Image (cartoon, helix red, strand yellow):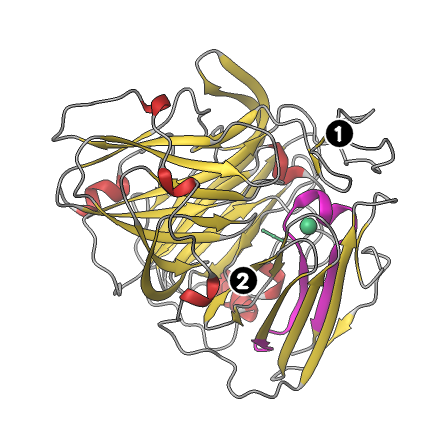
Amino acid sequence: MNRRKFLNSAVGGISAIGLAGCQDRRSIGEADRERSDYARRNVKQTGPTHEINITAATGEVEVGPGRIYKSWLYNGQFPGPEIRVREGDRLHIQVVNRLPAETTIHWHGIPVPNPMDGVAGLTQQPIAPGGSFTYDFVATPAGSYLYHSHVGLQLDRGLIAPLIVEEKNTHVSYDREYSVVLDDFLSGEPQPLGANSSGMGGMMPGRGMMCGMMGRQVPPYEGLLINGRLPDDPPAFRTKTGDRVRFRFLNPSGATTYRVAIGGHRMAITHTDGRPVRPFTVDSFYIGMGERYDVIVQCSNAGRWAIVAATVEGGSPPARALLDYVDAARSLPSSELTPEGLERGRVLELSDLESQEESAVSGENPDRTIDMVLSGGMMSPAWTINGQAYPDADLIEIREGEHVRVRMVNHSMMIHPMHLHGHFFQVQKVLKDTVIVPPHMGRASFDFKADNPGRWFFHCHNVYHMESGMAREFRYPG
Ligand code: C2O
Ligand code: CU
């Protein structure tokens, strides 16, 4: 079966827009010339322009047999429609807001020009109900990305979707590929999680489940989904003996970090947040909110196997999908299969990986080093960076061209996947845009080159932590 066919077919609840509906290169008109003021430096359009319409509206979604919920949706779908283009193509995406509230869309991971970044109050006025806004940027570099609302807690209301920018040349070969969207599904309106004042365990007086210890809170999710389906109705990814399958794991969850494993198969990690790395084979990996990992699976163990993503901090049953060989008898029901890799075997460590690309930063000596203490979850509802809760927090002013280093230590009991807009950063020997800072005095540090001027949001991608203050603005003029 040819790869292109797979790319354009609807799989596991995700249908793609983009490649199929793309127009030929347009002539440069007035509007284009105006928009080109927004061009990020050194970025050239090398492919067609895609005119894409996204409508954000209320609707209903079925996440399992009879499990129908009201939600907020992109084009009536959950997850939203996958946008899929080739690197160098240009996107003109008209977003129409039919929600009862203001909204925006952020193109998570792509270093777009600042006015296209979709952060309400920082890079644009939010789109009013009934209004619209057109995002315009060149889709580069290739990678697995996300798009989601960047207003308040809306990301946890269903406004999430994959954005795939295909490579012109890949450093790995494969026969077919699938996008795998991991999500913690909430019905109804997300509520801020209150202060943890009621002691150990049990339900909070408001909403939110305390998990074992002080300082850990998880919203009351209906369940964990893969491509919009609950574990009792898992999507099936078909394969056959001898094939190499590329899975793009994407985590737009509101508050869930997962450990991912596949029964009977190992995974070669090939991309971190879209950036290519030398393939490294493991039995499982952790994926925090906002992170993406691409893996290649060599299909040489015919049968039906479970693909499982188990939560690290919450209490919900694991999200589940199936790896289904079309050339083998279906054996055990999927519910009886728990991948061994969830408990034993080799777990990916970031230090295992090595970038296949050159980093924008070189040398050991940054021009500027910023230290951050991440705290929260104890006596107050605030989640802070150096004791400050955004927006009551200092601006971080840097200069164009600087090599900036950020060193973080986590004084809290929760995982913080920290995400920088507008840039890739180097962490250890790889490039990423989101990095987990482990709980209980865990540390992480990253380096980036200030090569995309503007006002850039930096925050924990646990949307509840972000909204309770764990965020900052990096700013530098062009
Ligand atoms: Cu997905 Cu501010 O980010
Ligand atoms: Cu956090």
Q: On the image, numbered disc 1 is attached to which residue?
A: 201
The N terminus - image quarter: top left
The CA span between labels 2 and 1 is 34 Å
* Type of amino acid under label 1: Gly
Instruction: Confirm or reject: label 2 Cβ below 8 Å from ligand 1.
Output: no
* Residue closer to the observer: 171 or 88: 171
What is the x, y in percent for residue 342?
A: 43, 40
* Residue closer to the observer: 88 or 312: 312
Seen in the picture, residue 123 relative to 369 is either above or below; the reply is above
Seen in the picture, residue 386 relative to 252 is either above or below; the reply is below
Regarding residue 127, the answer to whether it shows in the image is no
What is the x, y in percent for residue 421?
A: 60, 62
The C terminus - image quarter: bottom right
Q: What element carries label 2?
A: loop
Q: On the image, numbered disc 2 is attached to which residue?
A: 433
56 sits left or right of 234 in the view: right
Quadrant hosting residue 458:
bottom right
Residue range corresponding to the magenta coloring: 448-475
What is the x, y in percent for residue 321?
A: 36, 31
125 in the magenta segment: no
Proximity of marks 2 and 1: CB atoms separated by less than 8 Å = no
